[in-house]
Amino acid sequence: MPTTLYHRDDTHTINDQTLRKLMEELANTDGDSGYLYVDDGLDLTADVYIRHADGSRTTVQLNAVDRWIGIEQQGTTLYLDTWDCPETDLETTDALEITVGLKPVGHITPEVTTFISQRLGVTKLKAATWTFYHEVYYEAYTDVRVLWDRHATEAYNTRIEGIETEAEVLLTPILSAQQQNGDVKLTWVYE
């Protein structure tokens, strides 16, 4: 069954990283990226990583989301982008890490906010189409910020839908002995 993970403003420490939470539950933590002054629009990006128990990180996809956002009228817009996640092997102690970057025209580096899930407890990310939702707020036509975990309902929150995982089924070998015509036949049975 696909999972939805919400971007939150509260933090936790997972695999030696203290980052904002990427969780299945909302908490109304009222977070945002902070205001950026924007003349001509900005790039919104999202990168996908696996954070390992030893603190190291493996890239799944840079720019899984790469969207140009022009200047809009004042108010909130919910942007939707899809990305095809490849099948990815995991350790049960791995966590999903997502960076959201905002880079206004003329800036060399983006303003980045990083989120991390709990340890996934599974052995594989399944190939699936993920849908990224980013709630973007425009104020006075030039100040822009991305909002997260600001509503009691799921419909307007910055989130990722469609994450599919797979847990490896571990079978326990049991030695079975059967006697046939005076001979003992040994076979392995897996449960």
Image (spheres, rainbow, N blue to C red):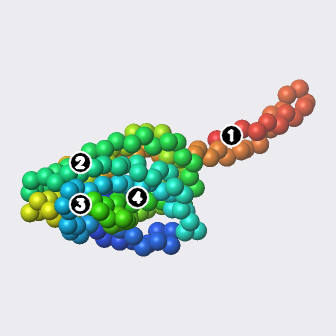
Give the CA distance from mark 3 to mark 4: 14 Å
Location of the N terminus by quadrant is top left
Q: Residues within 10 Å of mark 1 (few under 14, many from 20)?
A: few
Q: Which mark is residue 79?
A: 2
Is mark 3 in CB contact (under 8 Å) with mark 4?
A: no
Q: Amino acid at mark 1?
A: Tyr
Q: Which residue is tagged 3?
A: 146
Closer to the camera: disc 2 or disc 1? 2
Q: Amino acid at mark 3?
A: Val
Q: Earlier in the sequence, mark 4 or mark 1?
A: 4
Location of the C terminus by quadrant is top right
Q: Which mark is residue 190?
A: 1
Is mark 3 in CB contact (under 8 Å) with mark 1?
A: no
* Mark 3 residue element: strand
In the rendered image, the residue lying farthest to the top is 181
Is mark 2 in CB contact (under 8 Å) with mark 3?
A: no
Q: Which mark is residue 98?
A: 4
In the rendered image, the residue lying farthest to the front is 106
| Residue 72 vertical placement versus 81 (above, below) | below
